[in-house]
Amino acid sequence: MPSKSDELGIFTGSKNMSIIEAMERIDKNTKGILYILEDDGRLYGSLTDGDIRRWILRTGGLEGRAADVANKSPKALTEKERNKAVVLMDTAFIKSIPILDDNNKVIDILFRDKDVASYMEARDLALSDTPIVIMAGGKGTRLYPYTKILPKPLIPIGDVPILERIMNRFHEYGAKKFYLTVNYKKEMIKSYFIEQNVPYEIVYVEEDKPLGTAGSIKLIKDKLDRPVLVTNCDILIDADYDSIIKHHIAAENGITIVSSLKNFAIPYGVLDAEKEGVVTKLKEKPSLSYFINTGMYVVNPEVFKMIPDDQMYHMTNLAEDFMKKGGRVGMYPISEMSFLDMGEFQEMKRMEDRINEVL
């Protein structure tokens, strides 16, 4: 059984830990926050996934320490004030409170199991007027032989198809209408949802031939007059969709790409060398960190006019062509564990495990 100090260690970190280390710690504790401590254990500040996101957007990179990003005036209570925790969390709209001893050291952390009502009401309405386009027409060749039998959107994660999980997640934020671009085994997809009593409207956008991840959007007959959320059918993003849309609008982007941190560990020692093969540095099993494209986008409707008719055309083509014309393409960064990708076999089990934890 873990000790109290071990439990607190999951939710605390040092001032000198890197931004990447802090993101990994927040991912593992699944609470969205880390309390940053002085070297002697006194509370220095708090660090949320939102703080890190704002730092990345402001600086454009991952360099920095937890102390550079942390909120240095976090809400906290003493042991004698512990009974005020729920009231403080309600009034301050926060989800956790550290309990401090007389030396300002963290001796406990209290969490709310559920958000306060005002948060939930805002979440329920966040996507009520946002069109959602899900690209569900591909063959899913990376998942053969499963996709020889079932279309990729109907492959179950647990006991629910991935496509239904995606739509249910959006519906939690108020989404009412979905456009599904379909092609491969489309009749199976349509038949499945005919039998389900889903609380939202599904409009099928049917390709006669493969048009890529963006080409079929041109086939949508309805007039799109506000930012559209476009996503692949094999990913789940565990993030605040309301925040994504608001960031897109505030940043005045034409396209916003939801991007995930990805850490790649090199399982060998790496050498830095100069002329004549002189070794200058040894690095033992270093890690490289990049932001990758998750396959989720927010797009202003006028950008879709650039999509050519009846041609294979992908969302990456649209972003590149838009940038060439001087358009603004931004990113919304999320952590590595917030991006769940079903595209390959080894990722399916991780997705199911993560869903059981947080979704």
Image (cartoon, rainbow, N blue to C red):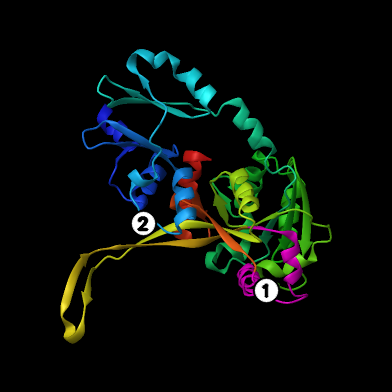
Foreground pick, 264 / 243: 243
Q: Earlier in the sequence, mark 2 or mark 1?
A: 2
Q: Assess disc 2: are there few (<14), some (14-19) or many (≥20) residues with their C-alpha within 10 Å of its C-alpha.
A: few
Picture quadrant where residue 76 is located? top left
Q: Assess disc 1: are there few (<14), some (14-19) or many (≥20) residues with their C-alpha within 10 Å of its C-alpha.
A: some
- The residues tagged by marks 2 and 1 sit, at their Cα atoms, a distance apart of 35 Å
Picture quadrant where residue 325 is located? bottom right
Asked if the magenta segment contains residue 307, the reply would be: yes
Residue 199 x %, y %: 74, 40
Q: Residue at x 42, y 59 (%)?
A: 61
Q: Residue at x 66, y 31 (%)?
A: 121
Q: Is residue 351 left or right of residue 201?
A: left
Q: Is residue 7 left or right of residue 256?
A: left
Secondary structure at numbered mark 1: loop
Q: Residue at x 54, y 46 (%)?
A: 239
Q: Quadrant of the N terminus?
A: top left
The stretch in magenta equals 298-326
Foreground pick, 58 / 241: 58
Which residue is disc 1 drawn over? 313
Q: Residue at x 44, y 19 (%)?
A: 85
> Tag count in the figure?
2
Q: Identify whether 241 is placed above or below 257.
A: above
